[in-house]
Image (spheres, helix red, strand yellow):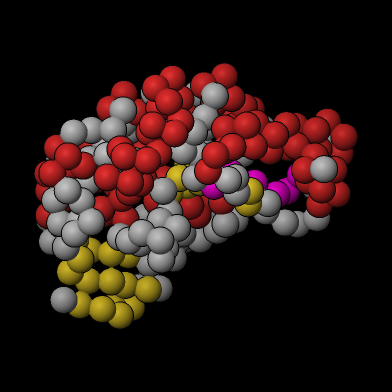
Amino acid sequence: MIAARHSRFRHQPLNQNRHARLNERSRQRKRRLDAVEYAREKNGPSVGRHQIAHVDLLDPADAARFRELEVTANIQPLWARRDPEVVEHKLPLIGEERAAHHFPFGTLVQAGARLAAGSDWPVTSADPLMGGYTAVTRTAPPRDIHGDEESRTVPLEPQERITLEQALAAYTSGAAHSLHLDHLVGRIAPDMLADLVVLDRDIRDVDALARAQVERVYVGGELVHQC
């Protein structure tokens, strides 16, 4: 059913963004990758830039298929931490073996997959500075009011960390690519739109990232917000 639907829309200028349920995400994600593969074999190349959202559980064998099938992993980095809901309910439900690949950002990057980062707002904060901090540390940002002592100090599967550069790329160039806007936004370069945010400090240090605040916002080169 999923493969047939995906194949039907393959030649239309549509990006397919697939979501999977909590208790079957790993299996459903495999089926969605299978659907993309089936459609490519049946119809050939497509202009669509398809995504699979959340990617909280993943069979490691499927990581490289994201790159091979040109499917973007649409991730929500702020979730990748030891919140009480995760520790008390989710981890016992998925078991130790699958928990080792929980929010597998590092595995995906190592396999060459493209990441696009978001928030699933209003479920969680849309602040990319907080999400970027968690992607790099696998802990809750100090200023996140929803974090507790464990989520702020004990990393969730630290082997799945990504670098700050990789996290920033996911929020900028990765997100722009998924929207077919990578010729306009997502990078600071000639001929790109000057949609810019100026922070109050250099965030190349992760501790500075946790404390950074927005000073100015420019849209199309015009100042639209100043703190």
**In-image side of 126 versus 205 (left or right):** right
**In-image side of 178 versus 107 (left or right):** right
**In which quadrant of the rendered image does the C terminus lie?**
bottom left
Viewer-proximal residue among 100 and 47: 100
Quadrant of the rendered image containing residue 219: bottom left
Badge count: 0
The residue under the point 20% across, 66% down is 214
Q: Residue 217 at what x, y percent from top left?
A: 28, 71
Quadrant of the rendered image containing residue 127: bottom left
Q: Is residue 135 above or below residue 66?
A: below
The residue under the point 43% across, 20% down is 97
Q: Residue 207 at what x, y percent from top left?
A: 12, 44
Magenta run includes residue 50:
yes
**In which quadrant of the rendered image does the N terminus lie?**
top right
Q: Is residue 217 above or below residue 131?
A: below
Q: Is residue 76 visible?
A: yes
Q: Residue 40 at what x, y percent from top left?
A: 79, 35
Viewer-proximal residue among 130 and 147: 147
The residue under the point 86% across, 49% down is 8
Magenta run includes residue 189:
no
The range drawn in magenta is 45-53
The residue under the point 73% across, 37% down is 36
Question: Magenta span: helix, strand or loop, mainly?
Answer: loop
Viewer-proximal residue among 193 and 49: 49
Quadrant of the rendered image containing residue 62: top right
Q: Residue 16 at what x, y percent from top left?
A: 68, 51
Q: Is residue 101 visible?
A: no
